[in-house]
Image (spheres, rainbow, N blue to C red):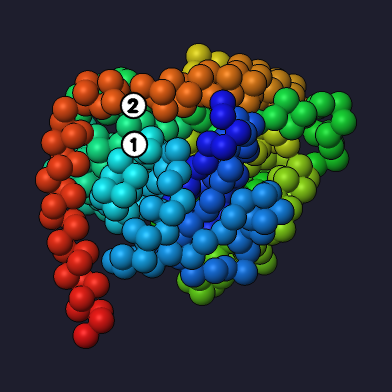
Amino acid sequence: MNVMSSLLIIGFVWPEPNSSAAGGRMMQLISLFQEQDYKITFASPAQDSDFMVDLSQYEVEKVAIALNNSSFDEFIRELQPTVVLFDRFMMEEQFGWRVAENCPDALRILDTEDLHCLRLARQKAFKEKREFQISDLLTEEVAKREIASILRCDLSLMISEYEMELLTNVFKIDKSLLYYLPLLLESNALPYLEKLPSFEERKDFVFIGNFYHEPNWNAVQYLKETIWPLIKKQLPEAVLNIYGAYPSQKVLQLNNVKEGFLIHGRVEKAQEVVQKARMVLAPLRFGAGIKGKLLEAMQCGTPSVTTSIGAESMLGNFPWNGFVEDNPEFFAEKAVQLYQDEEIWLQAQKNGVAIMNQRYLRELFEEDFANQIEFLVSNIKEHRLNNFMGELLQHHTMKSTKYMSKWIEEKNRS
């Protein structure tokens, strides 16, 4: 790959790898492109945060950009990136037409993080107290925006095989526009189980998750109201430690020492607290993508009990790192069993290592990913000829979004 190749990432937020799996994912993508000798610029309209990573330490240039402002046009015309990566479809909506207009030959990639329309449709069905149906996706307003964004891009990175199936089977997206790239682990990040705290050295339960993410907040409520009382009844001395970035006052108010339900908020080194716990609980009732917290549990040699939503697209054909249960009584029963039975616990640990080895090692994906990017950069015109619907959407969206954005810009001036 030419050493002068450049990548512009347009971020929804500045990366916070210690706050969420999404932040860690972004740093993995940066590393993959640097391995291909790309010079990287990370631009975002987001406000700086106290927990954002210092991009300069990773030899990434940080640039603040504005929404609905032609200053971006001047910026990208001067930069002339080889590849533009949109961090979630909202950034493609805002800046995609400007990229297409000013850098028409740049490869446009969408990192979906998870399929937003799936998460929102499931959340809506849950709140309406009914089962989620695939047909819910077709009436979800966000789906129209998200699918249009996927079609306009040359490639969309997907972390979930289930979501790829939905896109190809339900929305009829051509497979050439999708690329499976899950959360990745370095081989040296895999645990030597004998070096980790033993079954006897560990105690208590843990839940960890960013509270900006609605499925995490809902899971904590579910633990508090339904599941934890069932577990506590059988394990009266047990404690559930709950960690997560950005806890609101309503989260902090759930703290109850007498019930052994402890809210700690943000933790600097998540793996340290997960390694000390005997088990992870993750009763997620809606959501999408794959769950960084559960992959992290495997890295820490900590078995977990989760739901089918939690384990979705994570295990392939391998047995889970613990148990997968949707019924709250069964969930609590399996949690107690796993907490007390060392033999089952040790086997669950080994299951987690097998899943990581076969499904998440970086070395399984990095060469093919590099080849895919190089091929698309070299054959972008032919690739786009095979995506007529995307070109059609690009044409019409550019017109409508362009003039709406210019109107907003003029309105802001006056």
Disc 2: CA contacts within 10 A as few (<14), some (14-19) or many (>=20): some
Residue 69 appears in view? yes
Q: Which mark is residue 414?
A: none
Q: CA distance from mark 2 to mark 1?
A: 7 Å
Counting from the top left corner in percent of width and height, residue 145 is at: 21, 47
Q: Which residue corresponds to the image point at 64% horizontal and 21% vertical from the top-left?
A: 363
Tell me whether circle 2 and circle 1 mark residues in contact (CB < 8 Å): yes
Residue 21 percent coordinates (x, y):
55, 45
Assign a secondary structure to mark 1. Answer: loop
Q: Residue furthest top?
A: 317
Q: Nearer the viewer, residue 403 or 3?
A: 3
Query: Which residue occupies 29% across, 53% down?
Result: 98
Mark sitting earlier along the chain (2/1): 1
Is residue 166 visible from the viewing direction of this image?
Answer: no
Which circle marks residue 380 in the picture?
Answer: 2
Q: Amino acid at mark 2?
A: Ile
The residue indicated by pointer 1 is: 105
Could you say whether the residue bearing mark 2 is in a helix, strand or loop? Answer: helix
Residue 38 placement (x, y as % from top left): 58, 37
